Image (cartoon, rainbow, N blue to C red):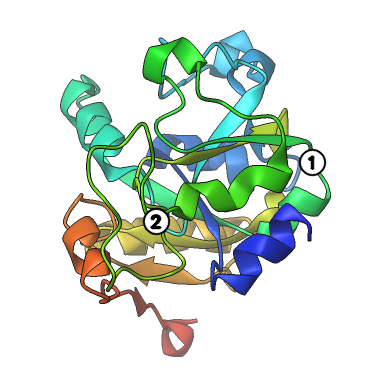
Amino acid sequence: MSAHGILTARGVTRLCHFTKFQSLTHITTPSSEGILANSSIRQDTKNVTDTARYDGELDYVCCSVQYPNSWFLKKAMQNNTDKIFKDWVVLYVNLSILNYKSAKFCPCNASKANGAYIDSDMDNINSIFSTSVPTFSYPRSSKMLSSCPTDGQAEILIKDSIPREYIIGIAVGNEDVAKRVYAMLKMYEMERMPLYIAPDVLTPSWSSMIKNGHRPDETQCDWSEED
């Protein structure tokens, strides 16, 4: 079974990639190449979230499974010195990207031990759901949602880029950000893109929820009457 098939069978519906609100301009424009790996971002528009990239995989886009790596997102928010662009969004990525792009995975944060745990054999992807993951101190809860990796920081690395058409939704933390994202999407004729207000998704609080079998709330915006 393919990596896409394995994940789908477990109920995984998406990959996640978080970015600054500012970066949506470059990601959602009609001429955009989508989400680019660090090595592919033009210097004049460079706005890299993880400047260190201890995993050494500069040609890959980091994604998490089902929910974002909100621990790293929290750290990125705290380290953000930009006084104007403070908001962040989570982009939902269609799993079918795995049928189109080369990929690697890691059962933990890919930067752990400078990338030592990254596996290029996607046939082994089911290992991120194991009852016990060697790189993670806590055993998998019996109540845990089957679609979520044992270690919430597990990653899938996508080669080069994620084209715009594979972005299937955007999650934000509050209505104010949602309105601004919607205005941008409408400008680029992407107002049909599903947009969710999901405050728990943008913080690590979702982790305790999914370990007890509960999904964090994600309220889809509907501003059709305003169009």
Q: Nearer the viewer, residue 58 or 156?
A: 156
Q: Hey, which residue is sitting farthest right in the picture? A: 100
Circle number at residue 133: none
Where's residue 34, x and y in %? 67, 41
Looking at numbered disc 1 in the image, what kind of residue is underneath it?
Answer: Lys
Under circle 2, the secondary element is: loop
- Say which amino acid is labelled 2: Tyr
Drawn side of residue 76 relative to residue 159, left or right: left
Seen at 39% across and 56% down, the residue is 67
Mark 1 lies on residue: 101
Label 2 or label 1, whichever comes before in sequence order: 2
Q: Residue at x 36, y 47 (%)?
A: 132
Q: Which residue is mark 2?
A: 67
Residue 198 in view here: yes
Query: What residue do we see at 23% from left, 57% from top?
Result: 207
Q: How many numbered badges does the structure rendering display?
A: 2
> In the image, is residue 111 above or below residue 61?
above
